[in-house]
Amino acid sequence: MSATDRQRKIEEVFLAVADAPMERRDAMIDELAAGDAALAGEVRSLLGHHKDDGVLEPSREHRRAMMRAVAQAEPELTMGAPIAPGGRIGHYEIKGVLGSGGMGVVYIAEQDRPRRIVALKVIRRGLASRRMLRRFEAEAEMLGRLQHTGIAQIFEAGTWDDGGGPQPYIAMELVDGPALTRWVENKRLGTRESLALMAKVCDAVHHAHQRGVLHRDLKPGNILVQDGPDGIGQPKVLDFGIARPLGDADPAATTLKTDIGQLVGTLAYMSPEQIGGSAEEVDVRSDVYALGVIMYRLLAGRLPLDLGDRSIPEAARIIMEQAPAPLSQVSKIFRGDVETIVFKAMEKDKTRRYQSAADLAEDLRRYLAGMPISAKRDSALYVLGKQLRRYRGVAIASAAAAIALLGLGAYSAWQWRVNTILAEQQMLLAKSADSARASAEREREEATRLRVLADSRAEDMRRQLYSSSIGFAQAALQGDYVRRARELLTHCPTDLRGWEWDYLSRLSDTSLASRIIEKPDVSLFFCGDVVGGRFGIRGEGQSLQIFDESTFWSGAKPLLVVPESYAINARLSLGGKAIAFSSADHVVRSVSVESGKEMFKLRPFAGRANLQCVSADGDRLLIAEVNMGRSDVMWASASDGSTLLTGEITHDGDVITQFAVSPDGKLLAYVTHNGKVGFLDAQTFAPIDDRFIQADRSIHKLVFSPDGKYIAMASAMVSLQIADVEQRRRVALITGTQSAFNQIVFSPDGTQIAGAHDDGVVKIYESASGRVLSSLRGHTSAVFGIAYASDGKSLLTGGGDGTIRKWDPSPEPDNPVVSMGTWPQCLGLSPDGNVLAVGLVSGTLRLCDPASGKTIRDIALSLRQRASGIWGVTFTRDSRKIIATCADGSIHIADVASGAIERTILSAHTGRALNARACIGDRLLLSVGEDGLIRAWSLATGRSEGNWPAHPGAAFVLNLSPDGNRAFTSGGDGIVREWDLTQTLADFNAPGRGLETAITAPKQVREYKHSSAEMFSMCLSPDGTRLASGDSAGLLKLWDTRTGVLLREAKGHDGAIHRIVFSPDGRRIFTGGWDSVARVWVADTLEQLLLLRGHQYMLYHIELTQDGRTLITSSQDRKLRFWYSRASDMPGRITNTPAAANPSVDATAPKP
Amino acid sequence: MGDTAEVTMLIARAAGGDAKASEDLLPLLYDELRALARGHMSRERNEGTLQPTALVHEAYMRLLGGDGADIKWENRAHFFGAAALAMRRILVERARSRNRIKRGGGMQRAELREDAIGAEPEAEEVLALDAVLDKLREMDPRKHEVVMLRYFAGLSIEETARAMNLSAATIKNEWTFAKAWLRRAIAEADPE
């Protein structure tokens, strides 16, 4: 009797006896138990606890007490007590509580570095799965990029774990001011001031929209106002889409921000399309609606619609149907433009609203300036303007939708719309030319202006869409949404792509090799393991193909193709010489790989269901057929199909779904539909004992470990269980993967399990613990087949994307690290690209291979005791000499080839020598140091040729223009100074110059007044026309060196910017700083594209290889990190033929 | 800071039987139940008039709409399951803190009103039940669900039957057996 049956029997007897009078019970039990003493005992034991005394009954008192318990429950109950002042979360010290709600607690906290007071939102522990946390961080990072005076800046998002589970937090700008409504009331702002304030809110909202971020919950409580110089106030919009799930709506994520009180408070500001619950309908215009409601609320002092205490459906109906009371009913002063603007923003039909927050702001400002508002202008021009605005709105909306939904094809749809705008314009222009001459002239001018505007906005939007796509692709990769990342990358316009695109593309495919098999929509399974250097693949319902593993990656044709085999499953047998497969016609066939001839064909069982070819241990095949209530199994000869042994398996009449044979051939395991895993003697088909393992239902893969001790069971419930076979006991459970296991395989040494997942990711798990060791990204759709290659190390996979891929499953970081053992304070790359020099704090100059970081040689410099090592390394232009500027003020010149120190200039600078450059010709060396001087040295003799004050305080960086005639220095005074070297160089190079003749000092020609902070970093673009400068406060600025004009500025890092480099093509800027991250920027707009996290402590230095492909960073964590943008540059990579990049490897699948 | 439409969706999903959504509903339900209970307690002195089952129904109606006449019981099963879970958590937390006060916090005892302790289901009962409930689920998920709905959501036999789409007789049997089983498990766990 099975355990379930037994339980059922116990219940039956118990219930039959429970109602009987006491005295009859014993007799009844004995009768019903029919001699089963254990059963009778169990029933008696239970009856002993069967009393009608009200215990556990939900009595009236119980209910009342429950009500009281609920009413008196504290909000903190489920989230733990708030942290007391002085407590810490990560690198924040708690100062006090600002507020708390359903999602967590908001603290005032002080950040350690940089020191500042922040608002720290700590999200309730336990609400977020690990996957959600990852996405939450990625999302918060995106939001961190919203930088606008009207938006509360997000500084950082992270998780902190004090042992009680990960606790997500967000550090954001602490806004000191009341909510919008209270501000307006307190300050007694009039209509005009209120609207001016709202125009500022619109600006902020529009800024976010342009970056593809919707707020979706705008309301007065989310807008705080600080004092501003204009007396109106500076609004700060809070909570921009925080924790809004990325792309696909994952309602689970909404628990982060769920609070029933908020739900009701929010309803009034929700647009009809939002309340309708359709995610695709929500766009920038939904935020415009909320802005309209807020304006109404500010002006009228009440909400436009009375939602009272209504249920959601009732409120929804009102929002969708009922018209708000006209503002002019509240006060006559609103009649006219004000009412028109507010009601246009609140239109129920979103196509009739302002199409962007910018449009709303523009009309508000028109009204405030006494100009006619757009909605009232009525002329051909008005129509044109309206059209333009309308389409622009649509374009922005679809860009936002594309980003929000990360949808495919949205980009091209958007492009199409831009074209439509332009076409419409042409048409309207033609029309306007027909109108009266005088006005036509004027209108044409205006139209041209509008057109130019539209064009420039279109280009603007295209770029913004690109940077958003890059940001989302990075976030998608972090969440293992490989396909989405690839889609986003594929749709990036080629002319905008740069390093970041290559870098993310590399991360989106980490396979060593890939090859397309047949048409791309086929799902590829393997025919068991690799046997005798051969493997078979089976497309769903398609042909079977057998390949030689050694020639497969060079594109060799299959050894055998069995066309239209319709194999349900297949196994290589006879050491890879034959392929046996079962098909839907209930027949097992075996075909010789060598000759292609059918060796035998058998129809082993009479059943009509699922025939499986389970195992092929050399000469024998195990064939099983699943029938209702029992399964037939047989061993057959793999050479002629003759029957060796037959048997039958039953287990409580359950359907048996899967089989597996242990590696030593002794055990046959099976699993039933109900998740019971049982074992038979594989040699006799006799049951071993009646012990089984209870696993989850819907186990669809059963695999023995190589030593036969364990069995792994993958279920459709997204879990993987590992059980001890001997003890029939589960030893490990892997859950929490985001996608189902399609197939699993043990590594040959048994220590790892590779899982092929339905989301296209292959994960490597540690068998003992279930810990994820690595994620292999590359397949763009579900992975079905998985097998270890015959080298026992690399992994082969087949996917729904029609590719077979090869992987190195050993855990390898995305961005390899080389440990330096001590602080690598500076880096330098030789102009020929062959040597990377690392200046260490120990005073050692380490020469490395820039491709791998492998040390070529160490050169020990003799520095004054206790000096903090080397602060700058550069090369002569011929790459033969290396120049090190050191903390003790000395400069050392060494020979790259021999490592010999050729010259040492002691006390070149007072204090530290910081940076030096060899001038064209490699004869003159210029250096700067802590003493603020520019010094000139003869490289040949080491003789001082001059010394000139450049900066009060230190001079940190020296750069030379491409022609070598200008020098740029940055200093502690916050200024970059540009020096004309023409005369200096001419004097130095003058033939027959006497040793006593002084050379002319560099002449300062320009100052770039960056800030008052120290400037540790500065870099000239390769063509010398742009100068990027960064200071100790993290401000990044871009200058035109031809005019001295400041072009752009951006908040670069939290804390100092330590190093800036341009890409060789000048299109990108890379920065590294105190905040331990490197950032990638569009050079001409200073728009941030990527944020590279990895180092633990601050970055000292960054370098980009000469080919512009690999970024190298050095950090206080004593490591160099290599951020490869091309997989082919990575050391140890032999083959890489990504399917997308190299479709020519397409296999030749012979058609029958 | 919420996209409340998604919350509505979450509830709909839970009602549609998505177990993960039920779990995610907890904090939401927790707040809703608390707010409703508070409202009733302050309005009506006669506490006996409102029962947990009514509370849960009201929460459902407020969040998903509809009125009492249109009770689609089968749609509510999972919602009730989530509500029962929320109630269980509230009771267990409260019982734990009460136990702490009774056993260790002598200083605070005086501050507690007698009736507050007296009318409550014994903290020990809730804690003991909580400790063995998971075992019951392992053995028989259906019985576990019956206990959750009966004990923590306060549903009657008939209501439980409708929520689980089973006959009242079946629920009654499940409940009778589960009670005996639980009581034995509690007794075995705590020999006092």
Image (cartoon, grey):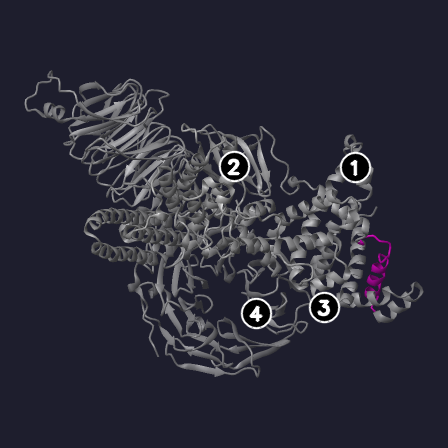
Q: Mark 4, mark 1: which one is toward the viewer?
A: 1
Marks 3/2 in contact by CB < 8 Å: the verdict is no
Residue projecting furthest to the front? A332
Residue A2 badge? 3
At 54% from the left and 63% from the top, the residue drawn is A703
Element class at badge 2: helix
Cα distance, mark 3 to mark 2?
A: 69 Å
Residue underneath mark 2: A181
User: For mark 1, does the 10 Å Cα neighbourhood hold few (<14), some (14 to 19), or many (20 or more) residues?
Assistant: some
Residue range in magenta is A35-57
Looking at the picture, do discs 3 and 2 lie on one chain?
Answer: yes
Residue beneath disc 1: B102
Q: Which mark is residue A659?
A: 4
Callout 3: SS: loop
> What percent of the width, then of the height, locates residue B4?
54, 50
Chain containing the residue with disc 3 = A
